[in-house]
Amino acid sequence: MKITKFEDLEIWTLSLKVTKLIYDFTSMEKFRKDFSLRDQVRRSVISISANIVEGFEKNNNNELIRYLKISKGSVGETRNHLYIALAVGYLSQEEFTEANELLLTLANQVGKFISYLKSKKKRGEFSKTR
């Protein structure tokens, strides 16, 4: 499949699914009252998809790789915030596990995409993703 727009990226689609789940969790009564943690986890999860898109729209593999690394970092940040939410009782173990598994899958997929882009760059085969 040829990727012509960021909406074609599976990692972007998965990042939106994770964002929706986080927004659902942070809208629950206990969580929504903790403005600091609620806003921080929302910012970090939004950063995941935003950096995928920003890197893609640069039309440059070096920039795309750089922004994908930032996005992957935001996945880790979001996971950390969810551990805190679990520890303070804002999420059940089941809710935490659901979100954490999606985030781990996303981190893995972003990492594989970074490796793919780097391998193409080293062989001089790939200068653009579109």
Image (cartoon, rainbow, N blue to C red):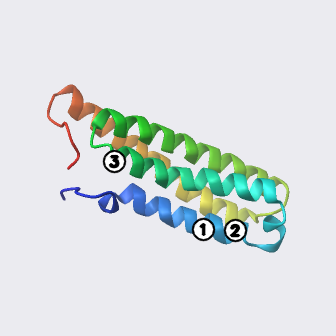
Give the foreground label among 3 and 2.
3
Disc 2 and disc 1 in contact, CB within 8 angstroms: yes
Q: Amino acid at mark 3?
A: Phe
Give the foreground label among 1 and 3.
3
Sequence-wise, which precedes: disc 1 or disc 3? Answer: 1
Q: For mark 2, what is the residue?
A: 25
How many numbered circles are shown?
3
Q: Position of residue 127 (x, y in %)?
A: 19, 36
Q: Position of residue 12 (x, y in %)?
A: 41, 58
Q: Is residue 103 above or below residue 60?
A: below
Q: Quadrant of the N terminus?
A: bottom left
Q: Is residue 56 above or below residue 24?
A: above
Would residue 114 appear left or right of 101 to someone viewing this image?
left
Q: For mark 1, what is the residue?
A: 21
Q: Residue at x 83, y 60 (%)?
A: 34
Would residue 91 appear left or right of 100 to someone viewing this image?
right
Q: Amino acid at mark 1?
A: Leu
Q: Nearer the viewer, residue 20 or 93?
A: 20
